[in-house]
Amino acid sequence: MSLDTNISLEATPRSERGKNASRRQRAQGLVPVTVYGGGKESVSTTIVKREFAALLRAHGRNVIFTLNVDGSATPVKVAEMQLDPVKGTLIHMDLMRISLTEKSKFEVTVRTVGEADGVKNLSGFLEVVTHSIEVRCLPRDLPSVIEVDVTPLGIGDNFKIADLKLDSGIEVLDDPETVIATVVPPRIEEPAPEVAPEATAEPEVIKKGKAEEQV
């Protein structure tokens, strides 16, 4: 997530409500949107689905962008996206207004870089446990991604949130002891247990005298 005042999206006020109205809007290539926060009342709008999809492809879900509604420009971020459970298509979205002069909470993606020493030289495996963290900061201080250099990690080493080196204006809200990445030993395949050959049944030997008794 990052702030770019040049990224914007046009929205149209939405007067019709209800499932039937939303269905008609989606059939027209629109997405119903609710805009809230910032000490103002919630506003119902629609955006062009194709335009929003292009914005996502170019900048990712966590971008802060300007929403233009009837000539009023407001910085917003995606708060929630509701998808159709069967088709996976976007059917509704909530946008949260963002103040450019006040600190807000954001979720930032974590990305590992480099090859861990324990992977390169000891055949270990890198496990990424945490893929995003929550921070509080001004929009202008918000990084688009937080990179974690895992190069020094050996077998059994961890990189925790406490190990991050971030700008002073960024406050991490997650537990400092949370593990972001760790290197685990190589997997050793246990040999299959040996199966003892089945014992060959000894033929029954019947003494001559006993056989005669059975006849």
Image (cartoon, grey):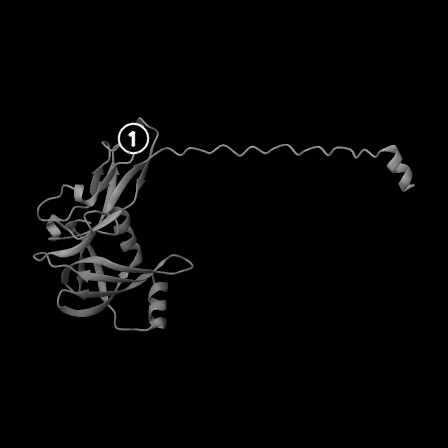
Question: What residue is disc 1 on?
Answer: 118
Number of marks in picture:
1
Q: Residue furthest top?
A: 121
At x 53%, y 34%, the residue is 193
At x 85%, y 33%, the residue is 207
* Position of residue 125 measured from the top left corner of the image (x, y, whole percent): 34, 35
Residue 145 appears in view: no
Please identify the quarter of the rendering in which residue 23 is found.
Answer: bottom left
Left or right of residue 27, residue 115 in this image: left
Badge 1 density bin: few <14, some 14–19, many ≥20, Cα 10 Å: many
Please identify the quarter of the rendering in which residue 197 is found.
Answer: top right
At x 38%, y 61%, the residue is 84
Left or right of residue 69, residue 87 in this image: right
Left or right of residue 127, residue 42 in this image: left
Can you say which quadrant of the picture contains the C terminus? Answer: top right
Front residue of this view, candidates 17 and 213: 213
Please identify the quarter of the rendering in which residue 183 is found.
Answer: top left
* Position of residue 107 measured from the top left corner of the image (x, y, whole percent): 21, 52
Q: Is residue 13 above or below residue 165?
A: below
Front residue of this view, candidates 30 and 208: 208
Front residue of this view, candidates 50 and 98: 98
At x 88%, y 35%, the residue is 209
Residue 33 appears in view: yes
Disc 1 element: helix
* Position of residue 67 measured from the top left corner of the image (x, y, whole percent): 18, 59
* Position of residue 198 measured from the top left corner of the image (x, y, whole percent): 66, 34
Amino acid found under the numbered disc labelled 1: Gly
Left or right of residue 179, residue 170 in this image: left
